[in-house]
Image: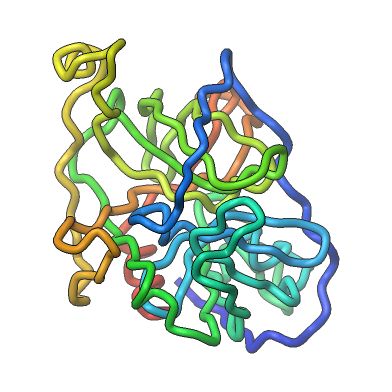
Amino acid sequence: MALVAVVVGAAAPPGSPASAAIFGPDTRTPVSPTTGYPASATVRLTFPGGQCTGFMISERTVASAGHCLHTGPGGTWRPNIVAYPGSDGSNAPFGSCAAVQLFAPVGWTGRSNAPGGGDPAHDYGAARLNCTVGTRTGWFGLGYPTQTTTGSCTTTQGYPSDRPGQWTSSDSVRAEDANFLYVRHPFTSGQDGSPIYFAQPPVSALFSATDWDELCPRPPVLVKPCPCPPPPPPCGDCPPITVAAILTTNPYATGPSLANNIATRITPEIVNNLMQWR
């Protein structure tokens, strides 16, 4: 897959945030404080006219949806992207960092001399920052399953523009194919680029561990090809969380994408590209 990188500086039109897609009750819950991992490594990205979510994948690099970084075929790179890791409402416990280089595959950006681009399967990218804040926030790992994930529980967290601060929700994989996971996490503008990872929802007074086992299977085993050393999350010895998909798109078209939100799933190709951009 051809890759594209740009040093930030060129002008670009304002963002085109996703519209709202909430199925049934809005199950998002606030995350505060955000100084503990993985909230610390979940990033609010701002740019003129919009905002998105990203997640740290190294001490200096944020991964996100491709459309959060580049407007797509015939478009341009977004200017003046600023990252706020672990943003908590109006509080930025880890400060802010500017994006100095943006990356996305040609499958998303298109080529200047040929048609193409805008492929939802390539709607991902990364922003390299002018700081190494990841040494304080920790970062996420990347991986992909080798067996079916339909029915597995998932968690996501990000920065919706319809409410302040960071929010999280739990759901299960409703359907899948080679390029996407189809989920019903509440999804409004600003949550584009949020990490999705497999996890058992927390046990509560309403649901026991046995209840959750009946609702969805244990998380699938993920291939984790990243050769990098483990991150230093603020929680000390806890293992890094492995992202399996990036929340990108509201319902559209036909099939499972008509009745679900869409997440671009992490594949070996995407892992390789993101590792190059770290």
The C terminus lies in quadrant: bottom left
Q: Where 176 falls versus 41 (above or below)? A: above
**Nearest the eye: 134 or 117:** 134
Rendered residue at 82%/73% (across/down): 12
Rendered residue at 19%/65% (across/down): 225
Rendered residue at 70%/62% (across/down): 72
* Location of residue 67 by image quarter: bottom right
The N terminus lies in quadrant: bottom left
Q: Where 146 falls versus 35 (above or below)? A: above
Q: Where 175 falls versus 54 (above or below)? A: above
Q: Is residue 212 left or right of residue 16?
A: left
**In the rendered view, how is the structure colored?**
rainbow
Residue 191 visible: yes
How far from the left and from the top, in percent, is residue 14?
A: 83, 62
* Location of residue 242 by image quarter: bottom left
**Nearest the eye: 222 or 241:** 241
**Nearest the eye: 34 or 207:** 34
* Location of residue 209 by image quarter: top left
Q: Is residue 84 left or right of residue 62?
A: right
How far from the left and from the top, in percent, is residue 123?
A: 56, 56
Rendered residue at 19%/60% (across/down): 224
How far from the left and from the top, in percent, is residue 122?
A: 52, 58
Residue 123 visible: no
Q: Is residue 136 left or right of residue 99?
A: left
How far from the left and from the top, in percent, is residue 18?
A: 70, 43
